[in-house]
Amino acid sequence: MISKRRALVAGAAAAMLMLSACSSGNSTDSASAGGPSGDPVSGGTGLIIEQAEPRSLDPALISNSWANSPVLGNALYGTLMIDNPETGDIDFKLAQDFSSTDAGKTFTLTLRDGVQFSDGSPFNAAAVKFGWDHIKDRATASPDIPQASLIDSSRVLDDRTLEVTLVEPVPNFANAILQTSMNWIASPASLQAGQQAIDSNPIGAGPFTLEQWSRQDVIKLTRNDKYYDAPRPYLDKLEIRAIGDADQRYNTLVSGGADLTLEGNWSNIDKAKNAGLQNAVVPTGGGTTLVLNSTKAPFDDARARKAFALALDLDGINNAVYDGTAKLPHTLFDESSPFYQDIPLADEDRAEAQRLLDELAAEGKPLNFTMSLYPSGKALGEAIQTQLSTLNNIKVNVRTIDFAQVGQILGQMDYDVITNAVVFGDPEPRLWFGLHGASAGNYSGVKDAQMDAALDEARVSQDEAERTAAYEVVQQRLVELNPVIFYVRSAPGVIANGNVGGIQQYGMGSVLPEMLWIQAHD
């Protein structure tokens, strides 16, 4: 049977997974960025750049997306399963199977036989249950609580088998695992020992083990000889550094200070393509958003949200922030998606925006708000302030927030506007998380009965026509309500020098370190 997601991504993948001009792609698994020809070469140290350093090596606290630390999580803990962004099919690694016989209400996870943690203890179903319960526990403060909370209960049937019952049917629940930290299982004993212990000696079943973590500098990893998938990993060591600044990431790569960098900046991906470097982007729907907090003034008024959305020139933002290189989300779904509808999310209409602003001001509510942005969002903030400065009865302030603050800020909804993302291949379960009124991941706080009902229907249905009709309602309600403003398609990307082989992405731009190898220069 054809994967439900295949039609969504196959065409986009062909366009987006770009090969370098001087190398040949030889992988059909997940996203291939091309690389040196020939068989993999063992040995050497891979120098990796990620965009953020984790606050802990507890897998529940490492985000499994291109914008965070997914290579580190994959390296320490391995992966239960991955997807192929070109087809949407699920491939198994530490898991052997994950399937449902009742339309997604109950799943059975079967683990690969004979897998060990790096300390020699057994990698078993009890460990998976412990890890998923750990993520679900609100005291853990994992960013992936919404996905783990889909689980109502789980039961260990034997060492290799875990039965999982969901709160409600989610046929595409595998996506919730492979796109999050649920894909990474640590030894229960190491988790029970506390954060200090796991930060100094994390025990996983991944291809690498921790050698040294010098905070704000480098994380050094060494090959795990107990890794199940010999002869992988090919590299002897990894050195991972976090660089949030896009220019610094790119310059470090091209100057030889790194072999590969995870990338989310369209300008850097465009520069890499023009320079003949390896580059690839996992195709997605949705995108990066400005989240408007609809639970309090000023954006509890739908007119304020509409005015802000209509006032923005996305092409102008693209030019100012991404040098005109970004792909823009004019519609919720990409044209290659089976769920695509020509329903513009927010067409610029400054005259109507000004009318709404004047109407609010006449009621004593001129629009005054603060955008909470990361340091890397300086250009975005300046572009928006410049655009809106030509309108009356609106004032835009900017505050800079640190990555370490974001969990608390989001949890307390301590913002007027904040950047976030609603990004997906297949829409479920991520679209539900980002927009449903009952979801903890709905950071706009919007509650709309029509949109909630449509999201619920699309989540449980296995009929493409029914899902298409439901998502049409979702798009119409987004246009009406403007709880978030999609301003750029996300770019779950990777760029690398030409001698790096085996680049493979899955999920939200997560790269598999065990596949990487480096061809020595002649």
Image (spheres, rainbow, N blue to C red):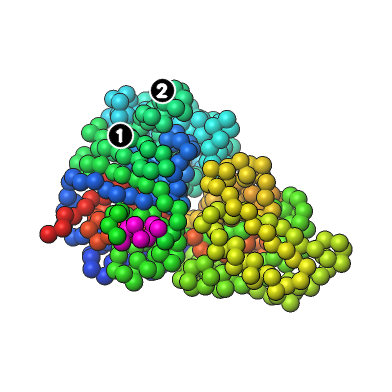
- Does residue 137 appear anywhere in the picture? yes
Instruction: Give the residue type at disc 1.
Output: Glu
Q: In which quarter of the image is residue 34?
A: bottom left
Compared with residue 513, is residue 107 higher up or lower down, i.e. above or below? above
Residue 463 belongs to the span the image colors magenta: no
Residue shown at the point (36%, 55%) measured from the top left: 261
Q: Which of 394 and 209 is in front in this view?
A: 394
Left or right for 202, reference 501? right
Residue at the location (68% across, 59% down)?
397
What segment is highlighted magenta in the picture? 248-254
Q: Residue at x 37, y 68 (%)?
A: 271
- How many C-alpha atoms fall within 10 Å of the one at disc 1: few (<14), some, or many (≥20)? some
Q: Is residue 253 magenta?
A: yes
Say what secondary structure mark 1 lies in: strand
Q: Quick one: SS at disc 2?
A: helix
- Is 33 positioned to the left or the right of 475 in the image? left
Q: Where in the figure is residue 303, as x and y percent of width and height?
A: 77, 63
- Residue 95 visible in the displayed image: no
Q: Residue furthest bottom?
A: 351
Label 2 CA crowd tier, 10 Å (few <14, some 14–19, many 20+): few
Q: Which of 305 and 151 is in front in this view?
A: 305
Residue 401: percent from the left, percent from the top? 58, 49
Q: Residue shown at 69%/65% (left/top)?
A: 308
- Residue 87 marker: none
Work out which residue is located at the far left of the displayed protein and give it: 522
Q: Mark 1 points at which residue?
A: 211
Q: Mark 2 points at which residue?
A: 189
* Position of the C terminus by quadrant: bottom left
Instruction: Report x, y in % for residue 54.
Output: 45, 41
| Above/below status of 108 relative to 343 | above
Type of the residue with mark 2: Ala
